[in-house]
Amino acid sequence: MKNSILKAAICIGLSVTFASCQKGATTAGVTPDEPSVDPWEGYEKTADGTRIILPEPITLDISVAPTRAVNNTLRAAVGDFDGIYDGDERARATVNTPKPAERPKRPTMPYPRGTVEFGQWYYSDEYREWQREYDRWQSWNTNGGEDWIRDLHIPELKEGDYKVDGLVPYTEFGWFSTGVDVTPYSKVTITFYKLPTSGVLSFMVNSKAYHTYYNRDENLAPLTLDNPFLITENPDFCYEQDVVSKRTWSDWQDIFPGSDLGGDDQFFDSSYLPMFSRLVDVKPNDKKGIDGRESGSTEPVHEIRSIYLERAVAKVTIRWEYEYYPAGSTEEVNPVKDHFFDDIYPGQYANITSVIPNNWTALLSHYDKVGKPATNMPFYRSYPNISHIENETVGTALLSAGTEHFYMPENFPTNASEQSTMLVYITKFNPDTQEIVGKRRYKYYEIPFGTKRADGLREIRRNHNYEILLRFRKAPDGTEQPYIVDTWEDQPVDIPW
């Protein structure tokens, strides 16, 4: 009996010893685990432990990154930049852009018209750069200033944790008046007194919106990371159930009350564009600054000297011209004899705009959650056929070859019918009498535009600049047809007649 008990005890002892050896072998050998190190050791934390209190304030500059040229690179992840900007691009960053001092002077034509050299110069980088400068000047005088920072909100911090200097004041919130001298606001800085222990800083700029349809001024507040959505057709309002449910159709006005669709073609005011940026892995450094990296960047953590914002919308520049020189030709072409471009308006667009970039899945989910009938708040809005027509003569129209500017929300379509479009209206006239024939804007074309994906669909990406050049040309049957000189492809694209 005693021997049996002894044998059992020996077996149990050996089993425990063997199991202990196995456990040690499957961890870090027999070395005990290192105690976890607090990355914020040495800093005083707030009572809730979400922020550290900086021993000295840290001040950084804020600017707006330049719009990116159209490209076919892959889209970034949610909250990330669409592209990391190089030194030259960052040098072109702007903030609170003032009114241009004077109209850009057109370059002197170095060659006589009708020569090959003139045609080459007409399409040179020098001439096109002047056109872009002129476009910016015209846009400022037509639509107002650019890249103005009216308000800035950091969801990871609380009021008093930071201070922003250089914000352009509101004159009247609902109208975003551009009648402000921004000279005193040529620089925008942010001073931090605390930093989040998460190491993440999200900058939501110009994101204040009405969160209810009635009692607006009592419900004006920044958007949040959970609900960063604006109504595209009227970005004064956050896209929330309370706002959408109170929208009712006004038969006598032929609009939704509070909507800017009553003949106004500008969704976003150029001096009040929503913007966003995000830094991750943020920590103070010993240079009275911070280290970190931009969200989406593969660069190692480095010193952050400036914060670069991205506009939450794309800029669309549409130019039209009636005379031009084909590449390498000495002959000026003026194919249109009896039509002119009458008007250009946004066509179809996504009716919800996210301040957070590439946030398409959450945007669709939020629309489904609000769950309104398409007649009250359609996800895709088609701009109405404009009924208001200015009294314009043929001569004035032909002399007004120029530029229009629009700011359009992100759109990542799943089929061709969901692509964003521009509406191009044309009018016919008698070239001998200079009288309009028939109805003004008797025909229009809905033009898809955007960054072309591998599947052929065009998506709209934030902070991109889409340039569209419109011309006419004669079809094989002799009729006049408009077409786009497509700046994101090598060949022009026919507009179906």
Image (spheres, rainbow, N blue to C red):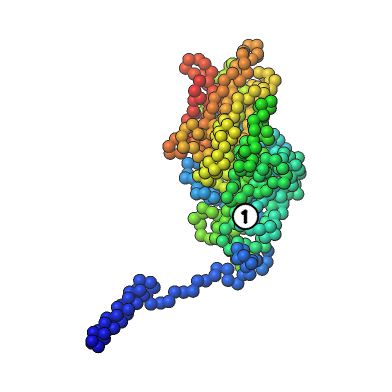
Return the residue nearer the eye: 128 or 411. 411
x then y, percent, for residue 189:
68, 55
Q: Tell me: 97 left or right of 87.
A: right
Residue found at the far top of this picture: 433
Q: Is residue 192 visible?
A: yes
Coordinates of residue 7 in the picture (x, y in percent): 25, 84
At 60% from the left and 63% from the top, the residue drawn is: 50
Q: Quadrant of residue 404?
A: top right
- What amino acid is at disc 1? Pro
Marks counted in the figure total 1
Using residue 130 as the reference point, say whether residue 413 is left or right of it.
left
Q: Residue at 52% across / 25% down in the picture? A: 483
Question: Which sits in the foreground, 322 or 360?
Answer: 360
- Image position of 181 with respect to 13: above or below: above
Residue corresponding to mark 1: 155
Mark 1 neighbour density, 10 Å: few (under 14) some (14–19) many (20 or more): some
Q: Is residue 70 left or right of residue 24?
A: right
Q: Position of residue 490 (x, y in %)?
A: 48, 33
- Picture coordinates of residue 348 (x, y %)? 55, 32
